[in-house]
Image (cartoon, grey):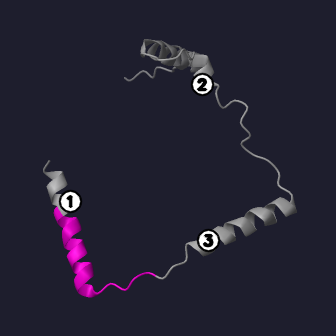
Amino acid sequence: MFYEIQETENDQLNIESIQWNSLPTQEYVSFTDYVNVDEDVAVWGVLSDAEILENTLSIDEDDEDDTSPLPLVTLKEASSSLEKLRNFSLVRSHC
């Protein structure tokens, strides 16, 4: 028979706090401050139509800069590149 041990959130925080305190630090940052660093960060919000349009238009403008034609690659060049990748993978797996 297996017994399930349930760990409460406070137990987990206590364990993590002990581990945190055992780490060497250059500046003092408490575990609680570290855990709560993003407590006041906005994670959602309501955008107006104007804000949505502004964001969409700025994204479209950024995309236009990245549209350059891809260079043509011959079958021989593609095959050679695949062979190089295969060799690289084999060498890395034996290291």
Where disc 1 sits, the SS reads helix
What's drawn in magenta, residue-wise? 70-87
Numbered circle sitting on residue 89: 1
Real-space Cα separation, disc 2 to disc 1, in angstroms: 39 Å
Give neighbour class at mark 1: few <14, some 14-19, many 20+ (Cα, 10 Å). Answer: few
Earlier in the chain: of badge 2 and badge 1, it is: 2
When the figure is inspected, residue 31 is found, relative to residue 44, above or below; the finding is: above
Taking depth in this image into account, of 82 and 73 the one nearest to the observer is 73
Question: What amino acid does circle 3 point to?
Answer: Asp
Earlier in the chain: of badge 1 and badge 3, it is: 3
Give the image quarter of residue 76.
bottom left
Numbered circle sitting on residue 35: 2
Question: What amino acid does circle 1 point to?
Answer: Ser
Query: Which of the two discs, 1 and 3, sits closer to the camera?
Result: 3
When the figure is inspected, residue 28 is found, relative to residue 85, above or below; the finding is: above
Q: Quadrant of the N terminus?
A: top left
Question: What amino acid does circle 2 point to?
Answer: Val
> In the rendered image, which residue does mark 3 sit on?
63
